[in-house]
Image (cartoon, rainbow, N blue to C red):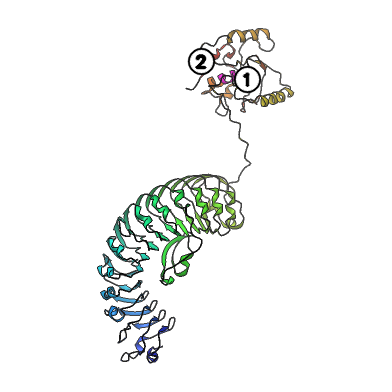
């Protein structure tokens, strides 16, 4: 269609011809329209060169010719013909040549998008622009939306960004910007989205980051930033998306940094910029995608992957109930997976792979009914995998692989019934010599009775109450007297006291390294006047380990050994 038939509509203020096939070559360019438009949208499907009207449109504030097939150069006088433009959208065409400097004369310009063209020279997104950001752009004092991403801009970040008092959206990703962030956006409290990803920025995240008090999207991924996350970042209580992935950041993930102010549950946009121009690139569900338009306001996520973070995962992350994406993979995080993660009811992608996490996977994670991507691969997790119910029925072996102590479906390793742990002996308190020892006497009586019922005849063992490291008197006489008085039970020759070579293995409480200390402990068990009678216990019910009573050849006559020689007290 041609626009020439509309030229006589003198009262026309607004026209939207989007998604129609408009051919500018068919227009009569000798005619001048009689109207003064305020709003004009010709996006999608237009063809031909872009020509300005013969007369200036002094009142036009919005012009969109995006997603067309317009070719040629942008008219150099565009700034003079459209002096009151607030929004200029010319992306996704085939414009070539230089960008006219007259755009810098449009002081009212708030949104400028020339992305995805074949422009050369010194500005804008996804073109072939190189060098430093041009100086004339700083003249657009009312600029709110700036997208210079996808070019070859180099050099440091200009500090003059602070001159844009109304700047709210800054997209500088996929360039070759270098050096530290320094003071480029210091005191830019109106900035809503800041995307500096895919550059060569170095140094630390600046401590003045909290000056960006309205910041909702912060993307610093794929740079060379280092050091710890500044504590000032915790004051950005409006953040809904933060991507610090693929840097060299270190230290721990501060729990209060992301828990003091949970992500807002509702999006309260107060900008005047068309939401269709908001865009960024973010990795979710293992896929890196560009998000643009209204969907942007619904994305809530954290990506700290591919850094050098250490320490445990803060359980306070579980307070972020509205978060949709959490990626902490490829770090050196330790400790368990917080059970509070079961509170992340809106999460769709959870990646904790390639860390040093241990412990069991919280079973209540199966209550995350929107979870589409889940991986804890390449950790040190143990126990059984979560039940294959709800979303967890869709996760295959790759979600759990390379956890050597993990078992259960969908892994091939079958979980066996867990054996109850053996009771751990606790040595008597060295500072309390009146202590009865480390054996519960009630347990002793029960086990002794069980052994007696099994027709195991008793043998005498004298257990002396106190064990001194020196000046211990009397054991020889008492033991000798006992043997003399009971020849039937203790025949002359080698005495074993129920301890054999097999009992000295590492599986037994009594090992070669701890034999002396064990004998000392045994001597402390009984009360001063009590003699307990045991003989040939095939299972050491007292200690919880196996002490077979066979194979006694070659054993030392321990009844003649002084107890003082067997005591070893750790200082």
Residue density around tag 2, few if under 14, some if 14–19, many if 20 or more, within 10 Å: some
How far from the left and from the top, in percent, is residue 204? 34, 52
**Magenta segment includes 136:** no
**Residue at horizontal 46%, vertical 49%?**
256
One can see residue 205 in this view: no
The quadrant of the rendering that contains the N terminus is bottom left
Could you say where residue 404 lies in the image, as x and y percent from the top left? 52, 44
Please state if 567 lies on the left or on the right of 88 as rendered. right
In-front residue for pair 86/546: 86
Distance CA(mark 1)–CA(mark 2)? 24 Å
Disc ID at residue 178: none
Q: Residue at x 66, y 22 (%)?
A: 537
Which label belongs to residue 469?
A: 2
Residue contact at pointers 1 and 2, CB within 8 angstroms:
no
Count of numbered labels shown in the rendering: 2
At mark 2, the secondary structure is loop
Q: Nearer the viewer, residue 269 or 509?
A: 269
Give the vertical position of 485 relative to 365 (above or below): above
Give the percent coordinates (x, y) of residue 248.
Answer: 37, 50
Q: Give, as a single range, the part of the protein colored magenta.
A: 519-528
Judging from the image, what secondary structure is the residue with disc 1 in?
loop
Q: Quadrant of residue 279?
A: bottom left
Instruction: Say which mark, if any, is on residue 498.
Output: 1
| Closer to us: 428 or 287 | 428
How packed is label 1: few (under 14 Cα within 10 Å), some, or many (20 or more)? Answer: many
Q: Is residue 223 above or below residue 63?
A: above
């Amino acid at each position: 269609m041609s626009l020439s038939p509309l030229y006589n509509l003198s009262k026309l203020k607004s026209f939207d011809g989007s998604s129609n096939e408009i051919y500018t070559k068919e227009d009569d360019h000798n005619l001048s329209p009689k109207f003064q438009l305020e709003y004009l949208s010709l996006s999608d499907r237009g063809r031909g060169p872009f020509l300005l009207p013969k007369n200036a449109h002094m009142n036009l504030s919005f012009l969109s010719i995006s997603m067309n097939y317009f070719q040629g150069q942008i008219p150099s006088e565009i700034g003079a013909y459209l002096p009151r433009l607030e929004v200029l959208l010319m992306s996704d065409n085939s414009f070539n040549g230089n960008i006219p400097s007259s755009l810098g004369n449009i002081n009212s310009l708030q949104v400028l998008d020339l992305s995805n063209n074949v422009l050369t020279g010194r500005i804008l997104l996804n073109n072939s622009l190189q060098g430093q950001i041009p100086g004339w752009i700083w003249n657009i004092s009312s600029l709110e939306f700036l997208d210079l991403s996808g070019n070859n801009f180099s050099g440091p970040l200009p500090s003059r960004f602070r001159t844009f008092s109304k700047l709210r959206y800054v997209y500088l990703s996929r360039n070759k910007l270098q050096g530290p962030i320094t003071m480029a956006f210091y005191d830019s409290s109106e900035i809503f989205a800041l995307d500096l990803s895919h550059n060569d920025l170095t140094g630390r995240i600046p401590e003045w980051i909290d000056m960006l008090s309205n910041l909702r999207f912060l993307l610093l991924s794929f740079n060379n930033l280092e050091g710890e996350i500044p504590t000032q970042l915790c004051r950005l209580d409006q953040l809904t998306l933060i991507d610090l992935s693929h840097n060299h950041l270190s230290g721990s993930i501060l729990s209060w940094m992301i828990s003091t102010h949970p992500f807002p549950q509702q999006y309260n946009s107060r900008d005047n910029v068309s939401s269709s121009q908001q865009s960024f690139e973010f990795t979710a569900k293992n896929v890196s995608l560009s998000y643009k338009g209204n969907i942007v306001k619904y994305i809530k996520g954290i990506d700290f992957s591919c850094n050098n973070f250490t320490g445990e995962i803060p359980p306070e992350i579980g307070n972020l109930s509205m978060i949709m994406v959490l990626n902490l993979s490829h770090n050196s995080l330790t400790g368990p997976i917080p059970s509070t993660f079961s509170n992340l009811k809106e999460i769709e992608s959870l990646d904790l792979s390639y860390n040093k996490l241990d412990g069991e996977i919280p079973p209540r994670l199966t209550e995350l009914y929107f979870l589409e991507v889940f991986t804890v691969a390449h950790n040190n997790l143990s126990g059984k995998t979560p039940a294959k119910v709800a979303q967890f029925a869709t996760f295959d072996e790759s979600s759990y692989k390379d956890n050597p102590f993990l078992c259960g479906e969908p892994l091939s390793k079958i979980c066996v019934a867990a054996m109850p742990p053996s009771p751990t002996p606790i040595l008597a308190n060295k500072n309390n010599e009146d202590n009865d020892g480390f054996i519960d006497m009630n347990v002793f009586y029960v086990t002794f009775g069980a052994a007696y019922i099994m027709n195991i005849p008793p043998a005498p063992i004298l257990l002396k109450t106190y064990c001194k490291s020196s000046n211990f008197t009397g054991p020889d006489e008492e033991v000798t007297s006992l043997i003399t008085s009971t020849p039937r039970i203790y025949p002359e020759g080698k005495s074993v006291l129920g301890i054999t070579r097999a009992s000295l293995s590492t599986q037994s409480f009594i090992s070669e390294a701890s034999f002396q200390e064990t004998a000392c402990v045994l001597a402390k068990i009984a009360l001063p006047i009590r003699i307990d009678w045991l003989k040939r216990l095939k299972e050491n019910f007292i200690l919880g380990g196996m002490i077979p009573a066979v194979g006694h050849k070659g054993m030392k006559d321990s009844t003649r050994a002084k107890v003082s020689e067997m005591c070893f007290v750790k200082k």
